Image (cartoon, grey):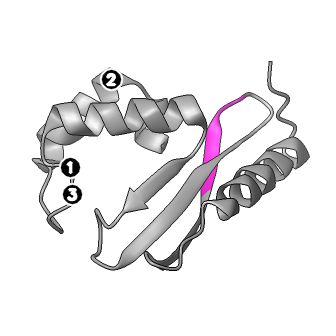
């Protein structure tokens, strides 16, 4: 999500620098896949790792912003993929929202 929040140019630059190495069979190794995933995550307000980094592990993550609206952190929860629950998404997003509010962020 941090990468997606920075926009398409940042995603393309990251892809060029890193060459998008495959950590698992689910890792995004094409720029178009990375862009799609980043845009989708930013639009819905959270990101999902569906075994892209490590087989058997799933993650839910979102951003924490400061009073200026800048991203200052991210929070996430990881679990074995078969135990990750969609119900956790709301808790992760809510917690990040509360942290952002404490840092002075007020969404427009």
Q: Rate crowding at label 2 as few (under 14), some (14 to 19) or many (20 or more) other CA atoms within 10 Å.
A: some
Q: Could you tell me which residue is drawn at 54 percent across and 72 percent down?
A: 84
Q: Nearer the viewer, residue 79 or 108?
A: 79
Q: Nearer the viewer, residue 40 or 83?
A: 83
Residue corresponding to mark 3: 27
**Residue 19 at what x, y percent from top left?**
10, 47
Instruction: Assign a secondary structure to mark 2.
Output: helix
Q: Answer whether residue 70 is magenta in the image.
A: yes
Residue corresponding to mark 2: 8
Q: Could you say which disc has been placed on residue 28 in the image?
A: 1
Q: Nearer the viewer, residue 41 or 103?
A: 41
Is residue 27 shown left or right of residue 49? left
Q: Is residue 53 above or below residue 66?
A: below
**Residue 96 at what x, y percent from top left?**
74, 52
Q: Main secondary structure of the magenta part?
A: strand
Instruction: Assign a secondary structure to mark 1.
Output: loop
Q: Rate crowding at label 3 as few (under 14), some (14 to 19) or many (20 or more) other CA atoms within 10 Å.
A: some
Is residue 14 shown left or right of residue 39? left
* Quarter location, residue 53: bottom left
Instruction: Assign a secondary structure to mark 3.
Output: loop
Is residue 77 shown left or right of residue 31? right
């Amino acid at each position: 999500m941090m990468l997606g929040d920075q926009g398409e140019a940042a995603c393309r630059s990251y892809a060029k620098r890193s060459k998008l190495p495959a950590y698992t069979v689910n890792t995004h190794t094409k720029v178009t896949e990375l862009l799609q995933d980043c845009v989708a995550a930013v639009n819905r307000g959270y990101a999902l790792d569906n075994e892209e980094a490590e087989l058997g592990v799933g993650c839910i993550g979102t951003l924490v912003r400061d009073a200026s609206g800048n991203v200052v952190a991210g929070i996430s929860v990881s679990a074995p993929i078969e135990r990750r629950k969609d119900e956790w998404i709301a808790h992760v997003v809510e917690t990040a929202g509360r942290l952002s509010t404490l840092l002075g962020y007020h969404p427009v």
